[in-house]
Amino acid sequence: MSKKTLYLLGIVVTIILGTFLYLKFCCNCCTKEPADDIEKVVVIKETVTEIVPFVINGTGIDYRSSDNLKFLKNSASVITPVKDSVNIGIEKLKTFLDANPEQKVTITGYATTDEKNTTTYPNLGIARANDVKNYFVSKGLSAGKFNTNGEIIDSWKTSGDTLLGPVSFEINTSTDSVATKTDGEDFAALKTKINADPLVLHFNTNKSNNNLNAADRQKIKDISYYILHVNDGALLVVGHSDNVGNRESNVVLSQKRADFTKNYLSKNGIDGSKIETQSKGPDEPVGDNTTADGKANNRRTVVTIK
């Protein structure tokens, strides 16, 4: 075999061997290998806060909003600022009540059994109802258009430490009374108890402010309870002073004390239209004005049921 023939044969063998090796080991080189880790589709479950809608519903009005009034746990105060959609509902309620003077609204506040009541009200639910009432009044509604009630329940919908909308609203005529929920109670006896040991608030010299002790707070609870459940119930607040200074100034100061007490009671849920004030100045002392203790006893307001 000639060298030329061997040379050509070598070329042929090389080509054949190269083709075989390519097909065996490199055929898949251009094919994209699947990734070691298969891409996973991750579905994120969106957390949706449970909605407690703000609802005012009655003949002639039906307003609903997904926003609502909110309270911190153990607190009687509405969290502010209040959402615009709730304020719109309050404005619609004002328009409705202005057009329907015979209608009133019963606000029921709710609190849970594990919450603490540090207010002067019988329970935290009614304290919340009255704070809502005060908020409505701040928006231009008449305080006389509202009754308030409170209920203690096992649980309420929350978001963290915030209670979502623990209030409800019921439209009724002005002749309706929440007293039907307390039938059988002896309110005459309660009135006698209150007037036998009336709420007496003492004041510092020439000042119309005061600090309440536990006994005073309990008396305010009793008074609030009576006024809330007796339709024609009313209060008399009488201001007094010691004899330091001239009588005319003391009469004015005593009236300021009576007005201060009325304002305090109003903020705690008693309709101001049910509170009458008077000033006696230094004319009816209960203590000896020649002693410091006697003068301190004379600087007072006295709250009784009329």
Image (tube, helix red, strand yellow):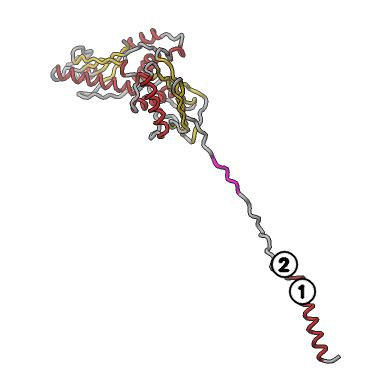
Picture coordinates of residue 215 (x, y %)?
Answer: 35, 19
The answer to which of 174 and 215 lies nearer the viewer is 174
Would residue 44 be counted in the magenta stretch?
yes
Mark 1, secondary structure of its residue: helix
Under mark 2, the amino acid is Asn
Quadrant location, the N terminus: bottom right
Q: In the image, is residue 164 above or below residue 121?
A: below
Question: What are the residue bounds of the magenta stretch?
Answer: 42-47
Look at the image and say whether residue 136 sits in the magenta stretch: no
Which is the main secondary structure of the residues drawn in magenta?
Answer: loop
Q: In the rendering, at what x and y percent does residue 96 appear?
A: 39, 23
Q: Position of residue 130 (x, y in %)?
A: 39, 23
CA separation, marks 2 and 1?
12 Å
Q: Under tag 2, what secondary structure? A: loop
- Give the numbered dot on residue 28: 2
Q: Is residue 163 visible?
A: no
Q: Quadrant of residue 256?
A: top left
- Judged from this view, the residue extending furthest toward the left is 246
Is 139 left or right of 26, judged from the image as shown?
left
Q: Residue furthest right?
A: 1
Between 302 and 138, the residue placed more toward the observer is 138
Callout 1, which amino acid?
A: Leu
Do the residues bearing badges 2 and 1 touch, measured as CB atoms within 8 Å?
A: no
- In front of the other: 42 or 249: 42
- Circle 1 sits on which residue? 21
Task: Judge by depth and name the residue closer to the eye, 222 or 138.
Answer: 138
Q: Can residue 248 be seen from the camera position used here?
A: yes
* Residue 22 location (% of width, % of height): 75, 73
